[in-house]
Image: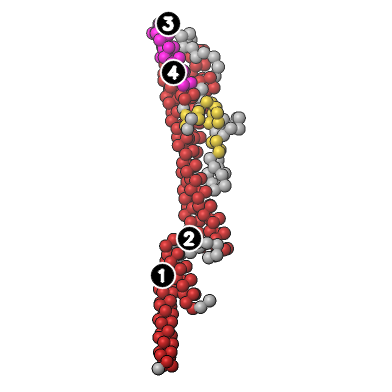
Amino acid sequence: MTVNNVASSQLNTSMIRLSTGQRINSAADDAAGLGIAERMNAQVRSLDQATNNVRDMQNLVNTAEGGLSSINDSLQRMRELTLQAANGVLTDSDRQNIQTEIDQLTSQIDSTSANTEFNGMRLLDGSFSAEDGRGLNTAADANGRGPTVNIGNMSSGMILGAGQFDVVNNDQANLQDNLQRIDNAMAVVTGERAYLGAMSNRFDTTIAQNQITNLNTAAARSRIADADMALESMRMRQATVLEQAQMLAEQRRQREEGVQVASLIG
């Protein structure tokens, strides 16, 4: 390969690297480096997707926690009404009116449990309970691993227990039983909310860790695959100068040969 060909090849290579910003544009540029860079690129893209997965799961968890907050409000109101119904100044008709509101609150708990959804999935009806082993995988890292989210069944029958919640016949024994059922239900709901809140905070940490790992991996890949723009600019100028020098030398040689031919003819 002539000096001119070398210069032309170097000029072409530098122009490609400067236009793409990549030092490795084909396997011929650096076969080993290409393999390493592609593995790192796969990890970077996978971590980006894992971070998106975690954000989606965090939104799901926050949606479920919002539904539980509504259920807790209903239980709080039921406890107030239960105590109100125990007041001796009330008539049976008054207690029946209170019972009507309690029945509506119980129905609202079931409605919230059945209709709290995320992406078409019901969250509070036991579809993802730990007991059934049907938790939601977060796919929180580049290999699809991550914590499993489990959400219990929050229907009234599950958290308040079986049997009608009756405040009409609200003597002392029934009152204490009703209050205990509500307190137990509130403990279940509060525990579930605390679990989901902790998971949401954990996801914040997971996202931050993914971003740090992604940044470091991207930086390592950049050192392998990205072009040194200053170096490539210098090489392109050198190749251009060398190519121009070769052209001038060729032109001089042709003129000298022309002079020699002319002298021979003359």
- Asked if the residue under mark 1 is in contact with the one under mark 2, i.e. CB atoms within 8 Å, the reply is no
Among the two numbered marks 4 and 2 on one chain, the one whose residue lies closer to the N terminus: 4
Among the two numbered marks 4 and 3 on one chain, the one whose residue lies closer to the N terminus: 3
Q: Main secondary structure of the magenta part?
A: helix
Q: Residue 51: x and y, percent?
A: 48, 45
Depicted 240 relative to depicted 132: above or below: below
Q: Residues under labels 1 and 3: Cα distance?
A: 93 Å
Q: Residues under labels 4 and 3: Cα distance?
A: 20 Å
* Amino acid type, label 3: Asp
Residue identifier under label 4: 105
Q: Residue 18: x and y, percent?
A: 42, 64
Identify the residue at horizontal 47%, vertical 35% (top origin).
60
Task: Give the crowd class for mark 1: few <14, some 14-19, many >=20 residues within 10 Å.
Answer: some
Residue identifier under label 1: 233
Magenta residues span 84-111
Helix, strand or loop at disc 2?
helix
The foreground one among 177 and 203 is 203
